[in-house]
Image (tube, rainbow, N blue to C red):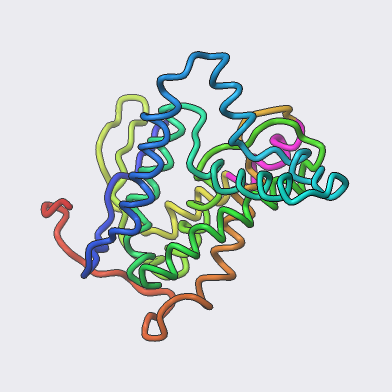
Amino acid sequence: MFLFPYQDDNPTRSFPWVNWMLIGGNLWVFFAWQLPLEPDEKQVFFSSFGFIPSMFFSQLSNFSLETIAWEWSTVLTSMFSHGGIFHLLGNMLFLYLYGDNVEEAMGKLWYFLFYLSCGLLAAFAQALSSPDSTIPMVGASGAISGVIASYLLLYPRARIRVFYWIIILVGTVQVPAFLVLGWWFVQQILAFPESMKAASGVAVAAHLGGFAAGIVLTPLIKKKGVKLFQSGYSRPFARNR
Protein backbone atom coordinates (compact mmCIF):
# COMPACT_ATOMS: atom_id res chain seq x y z
CA MET A 1 0.00 0.00 0.00
CA PHE A 2 1.35 3.41 -1.00
CA LEU A 3 -0.23 6.70 0.14
CA PHE A 4 1.02 10.09 -1.01
CA PRO A 5 -0.61 13.38 0.11
CA TYR A 6 0.09 16.06 -2.47
CA GLN A 7 -2.50 18.87 -2.24
CA ASP A 8 -4.90 20.55 0.17
CA ASP A 9 -7.98 22.71 -0.37
CA ASN A 10 -6.85 25.42 2.02
CA PRO A 11 -5.57 28.44 0.03
CA THR A 12 -3.89 31.43 1.65
CA ARG A 13 -4.74 35.10 1.17
CA SER A 14 -1.11 36.24 1.16
CA PHE A 15 2.02 34.80 -0.40
CA PRO A 16 3.85 32.56 2.12
CA TRP A 17 7.31 33.93 1.45
CA VAL A 18 8.74 32.80 4.81
CA ASN A 19 7.70 29.21 4.07
CA TRP A 20 9.24 29.43 0.62
CA MET A 21 12.38 30.95 2.16
CA LEU A 22 12.67 27.91 4.45
CA ILE A 23 12.12 25.53 1.55
CA GLY A 24 14.66 27.42 -0.55
CA GLY A 25 17.21 27.37 2.29
CA ASN A 26 16.92 23.61 2.66
CA LEU A 27 17.22 23.05 -1.08
CA TRP A 28 20.20 25.40 -1.34
CA VAL A 29 22.15 23.70 1.44
CA PHE A 30 21.58 20.27 -0.06
CA PHE A 31 22.24 21.00 -3.74
CA ALA A 32 24.97 23.63 -3.29
CA TRP A 33 26.82 22.15 -0.33
CA GLN A 34 25.97 18.49 0.27
CA LEU A 35 25.39 16.99 -3.16
CA PRO A 36 28.90 17.73 -4.54
CA LEU A 37 30.59 16.04 -1.55
CA GLU A 38 32.38 12.71 -1.80
CA PRO A 39 31.28 9.95 0.65
CA ASP A 40 34.11 10.64 3.12
CA GLU A 41 33.45 14.38 2.88
CA LYS A 42 29.77 13.80 3.65
CA GLN A 43 30.71 12.08 6.88
CA VAL A 44 32.80 15.09 7.85
CA PHE A 45 29.90 17.39 6.94
CA PHE A 46 27.43 15.46 9.11
CA SER A 47 29.90 15.30 12.00
CA SER A 48 30.49 19.04 11.77
CA PHE A 49 26.99 20.36 11.12
CA GLY A 50 24.73 17.61 12.46
CA PHE A 51 23.34 17.68 15.98
CA ILE A 52 25.17 15.10 18.13
CA PRO A 53 23.61 14.61 21.58
CA SER A 54 26.78 13.44 23.34
CA MET A 55 28.74 16.39 21.95
CA PHE A 56 25.98 18.81 22.89
CA PHE A 57 25.96 17.65 26.50
CA SER A 58 29.78 17.67 26.63
CA GLN A 59 29.67 21.45 26.82
CA LEU A 60 28.48 21.05 30.42
CA SER A 61 31.86 19.58 31.39
CA ASN A 62 33.99 21.44 28.84
CA PHE A 63 32.79 24.95 29.50
CA SER A 64 34.04 27.47 26.96
CA LEU A 65 32.28 30.11 24.90
CA GLU A 66 33.61 28.59 21.67
CA THR A 67 32.29 25.13 22.52
CA ILE A 68 28.92 26.44 23.63
CA ALA A 69 28.50 28.60 20.52
CA TRP A 70 29.45 25.73 18.20
CA GLU A 71 27.22 23.12 19.80
CA TRP A 72 24.21 25.43 19.88
CA SER A 73 24.83 26.40 16.25
CA THR A 74 24.54 22.74 15.22
CA VAL A 75 20.91 22.81 16.36
CA LEU A 76 20.30 25.29 13.52
CA THR A 77 22.64 23.82 10.90
CA SER A 78 21.23 20.32 11.43
CA MET A 79 17.74 21.62 10.59
CA PHE A 80 18.91 22.60 7.10
CA SER A 81 20.93 19.46 6.36
CA HIS A 82 19.54 16.17 5.05
CA GLY A 83 20.68 12.59 4.74
CA GLY A 84 19.67 12.19 1.09
CA ILE A 85 17.48 13.43 -1.74
CA PHE A 86 14.37 11.49 -0.67
CA HIS A 87 14.78 12.66 2.93
CA LEU A 88 14.92 16.25 1.65
CA LEU A 89 12.02 16.02 -0.81
CA GLY A 90 9.75 14.24 1.67
CA ASN A 91 10.30 16.95 4.25
CA MET A 92 9.86 19.76 1.73
CA LEU A 93 6.58 18.25 0.48
CA PHE A 94 5.11 18.35 3.98
CA LEU A 95 6.43 21.87 4.57
CA TYR A 96 4.95 23.01 1.25
CA LEU A 97 1.57 21.44 1.98
CA TYR A 98 1.05 22.69 5.52
CA GLY A 99 3.46 25.54 6.20
CA ASP A 100 1.73 28.24 4.14
CA ASN A 101 -1.49 28.07 6.15
CA VAL A 102 0.35 28.00 9.47
CA GLU A 103 2.38 31.02 8.39
CA GLU A 104 -0.77 32.96 7.59
CA ALA A 105 -2.37 31.98 10.89
CA MET A 106 0.64 33.17 12.91
CA GLY A 107 2.11 35.99 10.87
CA LYS A 108 5.44 35.84 9.11
CA LEU A 109 7.83 36.71 11.95
CA TRP A 110 6.07 34.54 14.52
CA TYR A 111 5.89 31.64 12.07
CA PHE A 112 9.64 31.85 11.50
CA LEU A 113 10.29 31.87 15.25
CA PHE A 114 7.77 29.05 15.71
CA TYR A 115 9.53 26.91 13.11
CA LEU A 116 12.94 27.39 14.70
CA SER A 117 11.54 26.80 18.20
CA CYS A 118 9.95 23.50 17.16
CA GLY A 119 13.24 22.42 15.60
CA LEU A 120 15.11 23.38 18.76
CA LEU A 121 12.73 21.50 21.06
CA ALA A 122 12.76 18.51 18.70
CA ALA A 123 16.54 18.35 18.96
CA PHE A 124 16.32 18.49 22.75
CA ALA A 125 13.78 15.66 22.76
CA GLN A 126 16.09 13.49 20.68
CA ALA A 127 19.07 14.37 22.86
CA LEU A 128 17.24 13.53 26.07
CA SER A 129 16.07 10.21 24.66
CA SER A 130 19.63 9.23 23.66
CA PRO A 131 22.05 11.46 25.58
CA ASP A 132 25.07 9.25 24.85
CA SER A 133 24.44 9.01 21.12
CA THR A 134 27.34 9.91 18.83
CA ILE A 135 25.23 9.71 15.67
CA PRO A 136 24.68 13.08 13.95
CA MET A 137 21.02 14.03 13.61
CA VAL A 138 20.11 15.97 10.47
CA GLY A 139 16.89 17.03 8.82
CA ALA A 140 14.02 19.48 9.11
CA SER A 141 11.62 16.77 10.31
CA GLY A 142 11.49 18.00 13.90
CA ALA A 143 10.54 21.54 12.93
CA ILE A 144 8.08 20.29 10.30
CA SER A 145 6.49 18.00 12.88
CA GLY A 146 5.64 21.17 14.77
CA VAL A 147 4.09 22.61 11.61
CA ILE A 148 2.05 19.43 11.18
CA ALA A 149 0.78 19.69 14.76
CA SER A 150 -0.15 23.32 14.21
CA TYR A 151 -2.05 22.54 11.00
CA LEU A 152 -3.87 19.73 12.80
CA LEU A 153 -4.98 22.12 15.53
CA LEU A 154 -5.96 24.89 13.15
CA TYR A 155 -7.51 23.04 10.18
CA PRO A 156 -8.37 19.45 11.17
CA ARG A 157 -11.24 19.25 8.65
CA ALA A 158 -9.41 20.74 5.66
CA ARG A 159 -9.38 18.27 2.79
CA ILE A 160 -6.13 16.68 1.68
CA ARG A 161 -5.92 14.99 -1.70
CA VAL A 162 -4.04 11.71 -1.40
CA PHE A 163 -2.72 9.52 -4.19
CA TYR A 164 -3.10 5.82 -3.34
CA TRP A 165 -1.75 2.60 -4.83
CA ILE A 166 -3.08 -0.60 -3.29
CA ILE A 167 -2.04 -3.66 -5.33
CA ILE A 168 -4.02 -2.99 -8.55
CA LEU A 169 -6.06 -0.06 -7.23
CA VAL A 170 -4.66 3.34 -8.20
CA GLY A 171 -6.30 6.72 -7.82
CA THR A 172 -6.80 9.77 -5.63
CA VAL A 173 -9.12 10.46 -2.73
CA GLN A 174 -9.98 13.49 -0.60
CA VAL A 175 -9.32 12.85 3.09
CA PRO A 176 -9.82 15.15 6.11
CA ALA A 177 -6.55 16.51 7.48
CA PHE A 178 -7.14 14.95 10.89
CA LEU A 179 -7.06 11.48 9.30
CA VAL A 180 -3.93 12.11 7.21
CA LEU A 181 -1.98 13.84 9.96
CA GLY A 182 -3.47 11.73 12.72
CA TRP A 183 -2.27 8.60 10.93
CA TRP A 184 1.20 10.16 10.60
CA PHE A 185 1.21 10.76 14.37
CA VAL A 186 0.12 7.18 15.09
CA GLN A 187 2.98 5.93 12.90
CA GLN A 188 5.44 7.92 14.99
CA ILE A 189 4.07 6.48 18.23
CA LEU A 190 4.30 2.94 16.86
CA ALA A 191 7.83 3.49 15.55
CA PHE A 192 9.18 5.08 18.74
CA PRO A 193 9.98 1.89 20.75
CA GLU A 194 11.90 0.35 17.85
CA SER A 195 13.76 3.60 17.18
CA MET A 196 15.08 3.52 20.74
CA LYS A 197 16.63 0.10 20.09
CA ALA A 198 18.25 0.93 16.76
CA ALA A 199 21.72 2.44 16.60
CA SER A 200 20.71 4.66 13.68
CA GLY A 201 17.79 5.51 11.46
CA VAL A 202 14.86 7.85 11.91
CA ALA A 203 14.94 10.21 14.88
CA VAL A 204 11.38 9.51 16.00
CA ALA A 205 11.89 11.22 19.37
CA ALA A 206 12.63 14.44 17.48
CA HIS A 207 9.39 14.05 15.52
CA LEU A 208 7.38 13.59 18.71
CA GLY A 209 9.20 16.44 20.42
CA GLY A 210 8.54 18.80 17.52
CA PHE A 211 4.90 17.71 17.39
CA ALA A 212 4.47 18.36 21.13
CA ALA A 213 6.09 21.77 20.72
CA GLY A 214 3.65 22.61 17.92
CA ILE A 215 0.66 21.60 20.04
CA VAL A 216 1.80 23.78 22.94
CA LEU A 217 3.02 26.83 21.00
CA THR A 218 0.27 27.19 18.39
CA PRO A 219 -2.45 28.51 20.74
CA LEU A 220 0.08 30.98 22.17
CA ILE A 221 1.48 32.27 18.89
CA LYS A 222 -1.47 32.30 16.46
CA LYS A 223 -3.13 35.60 15.66
CA LYS A 224 -5.92 36.59 18.03
CA GLY A 225 -8.58 36.44 15.33
CA VAL A 226 -7.61 32.96 14.19
CA LYS A 227 -9.65 30.16 15.73
CA LEU A 228 -8.57 26.60 16.39
CA PHE A 229 -10.30 23.62 14.74
CA GLN A 230 -11.33 25.45 11.57
CA SER A 231 -12.52 23.62 8.49
CA GLY A 232 -10.29 25.53 6.07
CA TYR A 233 -11.34 27.36 2.93
CA SER A 234 -12.98 25.22 0.29
CA ARG A 235 -12.09 25.55 -3.39
CA PRO A 236 -12.20 23.28 -6.47
CA PHE A 237 -9.21 21.01 -6.76
CA ALA A 238 -8.97 21.85 -10.47
CA ARG A 239 -7.44 25.19 -9.54
CA ASN A 240 -4.00 23.99 -8.54
CA ARG A 241 -1.56 26.25 -6.79
Q: Dominant secondary structure of the magenta stretch?
A: helix
**Residue 159 position by quadrant:** bottom left
Q: The N terminus is located in which quarter? A: top left
Identified at 69% across, 36% down, the residue is 195
On whether residue 191 falls in the magenta region, the answer is yes
The image quarter containing residue 171 is top left
On the image, the x and y values in percent for residue 2 come to 39, 32
Residue 180 location (% of width, % of height): 42, 52
Identify which residue, 157 or 102, lies in the foreground.
102
The answer to whether residue 175 is seen in the rendering is no
Q: Where does the magenta region start and end? A: 188-197
**Viewed as shown, does residue 64 lie left or right of 204?**
right
Residue 173, position in %: x, y? 28, 47
User: In the rendered image of this protein, does residue 198 appear above or below residue 67?
Assistant: above
Q: Residue at x 61, y 36 (%)?
A: 50
The stretch drawn in magenta includes residue 161: no
Residue shown at 44%/55% (left/top)? 179
- Left or right relative to 67: residue 228: left
Q: Quadrant of residue 167?
A: top left
Q: Residue furthest front?
A: 65
